[in-house]
Amino acid sequence: MGAPRGAGVERTLGAMIPSVSELLLDVTLAATEGGKLGVTDSVIKFFKDGGPFMFVNLFWLACSLAVALERIVTLVFRYNLNAPPFMEQIAKLVRSGNLDRAVKVCAMAPNAPLAKVVRAGLVNANRGEIEVSKAVEEAIVEHSPNVSKRIPWLWSLANIATLVGLVGTIFGLIGTFQALGNVPAEQKQVLLSDGISKAMNNTAFALSIAVICIIFHLFLTSYAKSMVEGLELNALKLENLLSRRGSVDPATTELEARAS
């Protein structure tokens, strides 16, 4: 009796060992495949799982980055002008009566709004205070909108991307619930969790785009506001400088130059 029982145990263990070995092998292969999945493959899988609305939001992301990059290049590089030394040089030339040279200095920065506004005032310097004020005000009204141009688009793009992501999530959930009716009961929970996870890719991507747009909008709005305020302040300084031209004695002019 002992021998048959021992043989049965050996057969049972022999059957179990290959089963455990196969299970461990499957787990090892799955882990290896998951480890081989690189960043690029993960991103591609992320978009494919999210569905077609992911690619719609990819277009809005490209638009947002294009607007932000264009505004940064324009404001930080093309429109940028170091105002204090520029206005100091203009003031010295105006006090010395060399208006032509001051106009040429403004022409050296043809894209900067500040240089354009100052040039408008200098060109009309010999026509009286009223004409100077009108010319400067007209130049401010003309060039100030160029500073804040297209910045409000970022806020709208953030809202559009968020709504598109929500629509993609809803469509993904609808497709998941429709597919539940065609599968066995024991597979519904797995299918439901997988479908919800993939549908949420749309929301995650959309909110990421919205955060990027809001950050760029905050930075560019603050930068543009500071530039416009500096433009208006220096325009006022120019008007006062031109109004006092020729009516101040040299001693007072020298004291003002030292104070500045």
Image (tube, rainbow, N blue to C red):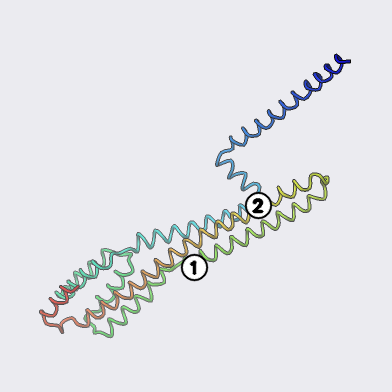
As helix, strand or loop, the secondary structure at mark 2 comes to: helix
Residue at which label 1 appears: 152
Residue pushed farthest top? 3
Numbered badge on residue 127? none
Q: Is residue 2 above or below residue 115?
A: above
Label 1 CA crowd tier, 10 Å (few <14, some 14–19, many 20+): few
- Label 2 amino acid? Pro
User: How many numbered marks does the figure carry?
Assistant: 2
- As drawn, the residue found furthest toward the front would be 2
| Quadrant into which the C terminus falls | bottom left
Q: Left of 36 or right of it: where is 240? A: left
Give coordinates of residue 28: x percent, y percent: 65, 30
The disc placed on residue 52 is 2
Secondary structure category for the residue under label 1: helix
Across and down, in percent, residue 140 comes to 35, 75
Identify the mark nearer the N-term, 1 or 2.
2
Circle 2 packing at 10 Å, graded few (<14), some (14-19), many (20+), is few
| Residue type highlighted by circle 1 | Pro
Tell me: residue 199, above or below residue 92: above
Closer to the camera in the image, 206 or 117 = 206
Left or right: 81 in relation to 21: left
Residue 216 position in % (x across, y down): 46, 61
Question: What quarter of the picture does the N terminus occupy?
Answer: top right
Q: Is residue 246 left or right of residue 236?
A: left
Q: Is residue 177 left or right of residue 116?
A: right
